Image (cartoon, grey):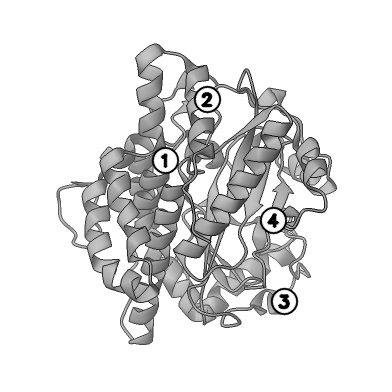
Amino acid sequence: MSKQLIPEDITGKGSSGTGSTASVLEHRFGKSDPYTLGVEEEYQLLDGVSFDLVQHIETVLAAIEGHELEPQINPELMQSVLEIATPVCHTPADVMGELVKLRAYVCGVAREKDMRVGSAGTHPFSLFERQRITAKDRYRQLVDQLQYIARRELIFGMHIHVAIDNPDKAIKIMNGLLPQLAPLLALSASSPFWRGEPTGLMSSRQMVFASFPRSGPPPRFRDYADYAEVVGQLERTGCIADYTHIWWDIRPHPRLGTIEIRICDAVTRVEDAVAITAYCQALVKQLSERFDAGEEIPSYHRILTTENKWLAARYGLEAPVMDLSTGRRNRIPVAQLVRRTVREIEPHARELGSERELEGIAELLARGNSADRQLRIFNANRDIREVVEEIAITTETLPTIAA
């Protein structure tokens, strides 16, 4: 990874993008310490009174010009979206410090401009038809290519990068993480509303993004060369500019030397974001050591991991998922699967110095995810504006971090 995590560029600018298999094979795996982290979060820019989305990203960017955090704050496809990216972090505790700093800063800037900031997978009532596209060529090109699919993409995610020291290992770890798509989505689910209506889903964001090409769970690859050949074919035929136009739930990021976990909704509580980061880092360490020991890392058919993902999007932490690792005939609650995984990865978290942050998973399971909280608030008064106000308050409520 580079000194600072490079925020996602939806057009792939900044990577090689030359359209040859050889260029795709170039990578930075092993160029930084294993298991170092980077986290990206996409936030909602909200009116300070109505809590509707506002098209004021340029106002924010002008206000932060010259600040030390400016390089870590960026626009996205729509003018109501703000993306932040942490620098490279060694531990989830470091991630906590960076996220608290970034959230506090952007929330403060927004308040000064009569706005608020919210973190959730969808805005509960704003309409995509009323959003303006950010005035950059790369976003206009994306809309020109994808049309309605891109114009409808009023969704917000959290991406977690974990550094890997070997390209073939990165592919095997990606394969091994596929059974974790459902648990990670259930833990992060924060989008039960779409266009002012409760959808009956805990992650509506997943259903919106599913219409994107090259999205969803990745296929299982043999090794890095297999992955590079597929990407090279897409580039040579002009289907994509480079690999960053592949929007899988988990993907290799050769330019950064990381596995990028993209399945998560934007998480409202910063403590939950950090707990999920600790969970991901310990999982990657566990799979990495199994690879180094010459063990076979199990992977499962895409239809099975996709079914579990659907169940997590529908039911959240109550999802009755298939227990793929044991092959049991009965389904089990996804929360039970998460607890078992936490027990398995606790020794790895301890070695990483992140056992306290991993404990946040148990706290999340006991309290419920952001979707649970949003639905409780809505069901109390049927006031959807109150739901967004609570998202903003929770996003702004930050722990005190010791210097």
Query: In the structure shown, which secondary structural element does the residue marked by tag 3 occupy?
Result: helix
Query: The residue under label 4 is which amino acid type?
Result: Gln
On the image, numbered disc 1 is attached to which residue? 189
Query: In the structure shown, which secondary structural element does the residue marked by tag 1 occupy?
Result: loop
Query: The residue under label 2 is which amino acid type?
Result: Glu
On the image, numbered disc 3 is attached to which residue? 23
Q: Which mark is residue 137?
A: none
Q: Which badge, 2 or 3, comes first in the chain's sequence?
A: 3
Q: Residues within 10 Å of mark 1 (few under 14, many from 20)?
A: many
Q: Residue 342: where, in percent of width, then height?
A: 27, 61
Q: Quadrant of residue 59?
A: top right
Q: Is 330 positioned to the left or the right of 389 in the image?
A: left
Q: Which badge, 1 or 4, comes first in the chain's sequence?
A: 4
Q: Which badge, 1 or 2, comes first in the chain's sequence?
A: 1
On the image, numbered disc 4 is attached to which residue? 72
Q: Which badge, 4 or 2, comes first in the chain's sequence?
A: 4
- Mark 2 or 3, closer to the camera: 2
In contact (CB < 8 Å): disc 4 and disc 2:
no
Residue at mark 4 to residue at mark 2: CA–CA distance: 26 Å
**Can residue 395 be seen by looking at this rendering?**
yes
Q: Which badge, 3 or 1, comes first in the chain's sequence?
A: 3
In contact (CB < 8 Å): disc 4 and disc 3:
no
On the image, numbered disc 2 is attached to which residue? 389
Q: Is 57 positioned to the left or the right of 86 in the image?
A: right
Q: Which badge, 4 or 3, comes first in the chain's sequence?
A: 3
